[in-house]
Image: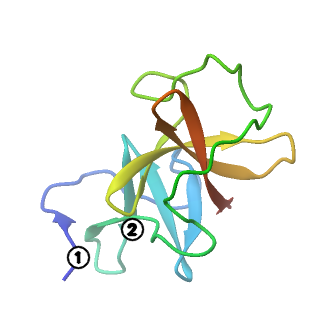
Amino acid sequence: MPDTHDDHPHQHGEGCGHTAIRHNGHVDYLHDGHLHHQAEDGTVEEHAIAVSETNPDGCAPHSCGCHDDGHVHGPGCGHEAVPHGDHIDYLVIGPDGKAHLHHPHGDHCDDHGIVEIV
C-alpha cells in the first residue's frame, strides 16, 4: 500500500494551483517537494517518478542552457522539487520547452530525463 497523508485538507485537481505531472497513466501534483496523487476516495498518496530508461538516475553531466552554470539546485533554488526514485530532483523547463529533471551532483548537474506537465 502506498504512503498516504492522514490529514490533507487540500483537494488536488485541475486548477488547484499545483504543477500537474502525468505519471504512470494518471496525473500527480507537485506540492511542497512531494508528488501527490489524489485517489477517488479522497486519500492523498505519496508517489515518486520511477527510475527508468526515460528517467535514469545515473551521473549524466550536461550543459542545458536552462540556467547559469553556477546555479546550484536545492531548497529555495527557484525550481520545484520532484521525488525521483530514492532522491529529489528539480523541475527545469529547457530551451526545448520540455520539463527536465535535474539532480545536483558534486560540481555539476545531472539530467534525469523528461516528465510531462499537463
Residue 14 against residue 94 in the figure, above or below: below
Q: What number is the disc on residue 2?
A: 1
In the figure, is residue 91 to the left or right of 65?
A: left
| Residue 62 position within the rendered picture, expressed as x and y whole percent measured from the top left | 70, 41
| Residue 48 position within the rendered picture, expressed as x and y whole percent measured from the top left | 39, 64
What residue appears at the point 49 percent right and 60 percent down from the top-left corner? Answer: 57
In the figure, is residue 41 to the left or right of 59?
A: left
Amino acid type shown at disc 1: Pro
> Which residue position holds label 2?
37
Marks 1 and 2, Cα distance to the nearest angstrom? Answer: 10 Å
| Residue 78 position within the rendered picture, expressed as x and y whole percent measured from the top left | 54, 24
Q: Residue furthest right?
A: 96
The answer to whether the residues at label 1 and label 2 have Cβ atoms under 8 Å apart is yes
What residue appears at the point 37 percent right and 43 percent down from the top-left corner? Answer: 33
Q: Nearer the viewer, mark 1 or mark 2?
A: 1
The quadrant of the picture occupied by the C terminus is: bottom right
Q: Is the residue marked by circle 1 packed among few (<14), some (14-19), or many (20+) residues within 10 Å?
A: few
Give the structural element (helix, strand or loop) at label 2: strand
In the figure, is residue 8 to the left or right of 71?
A: left
The quadrant of the picture occupied by the N terminus is: bottom left
Residue 87 against residue 54 in the figure, above or below: above
Amino acid type shown at disc 2: His
What residue appears at the point 29 percent right and 68 percent down from the top-left corner? Answer: 45
Q: Is the residue marked by circle 2 packed among few (<14), some (14-19), or many (20+) residues within 10 Å?
A: many
